[in-house]
Each structure stands twice: as structure tokens, then as C-alpha cells.
Amino acid sequence: MSDIMYDPAQCRNITLDIRYVLFIIDKFAGAKNLVDEMVISK
């Protein structure tokens, strides 16, 4: 994390939309059971 000072040698952050993660889990990872267990509010 880079809360205080950014150091490119140590900071490796990935930002993405959780809707995309849920889509990949459901459609491509074959783990629909994980999505079914989650309480997802709209």
C-alpha cells in the first residue's frame, strides 16, 4: 500500500470493478456456488 509514500518498487495495486470480478467468477471460473452464497444488494 502507498498510504504515506509511493514506492514503485514495492507498490503493486490493482483497481477493478467488483461487478467484473463477480462476472468472471460466475461465468468463467465455474464457481457459481460462490456467487450464490453471497448476499448482493443492488
Image: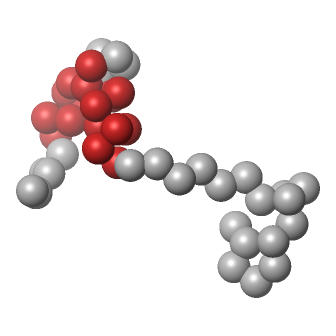
Quadrant in the rendering for residue 20: top left
Q: Going by the picture, which residue comes out furthest to the right?
A: 9
Query: Residue at image x 14%, y 51%?
Result: 40
Query: Residue at image x 33%, y 28%?
Result: 25
Give how far across and how far down residue 7 sits, in percent. 86, 66
Front residue of this view, candidates 42 and 31: 42
Front residue of this view, candidates 40 and 7: 7
* Residue 25 appears left or right of 10: left
Query: Residue at image x 27%, y 19%?
Result: 27
* Residue 24 appears left or right of 5: left
Name above or below for residue 27 compared with residue 1: above
* Residue 17 appears left or right of 26: right
Give how far across and how far down residue 14 sits, in percent. 59, 50
Name above or below for residue 27 compared with residue 13: above
Figure disc tally: 0
Give how far across and how far down residue 31 sits, in percent. 29, 23
Query: Residue at image x 73%, y 72%?
Result: 2
Image quadrant where one finds the N terminus: bottom right
Give how far across and how far down residue 28 sits, in percent. 34, 16
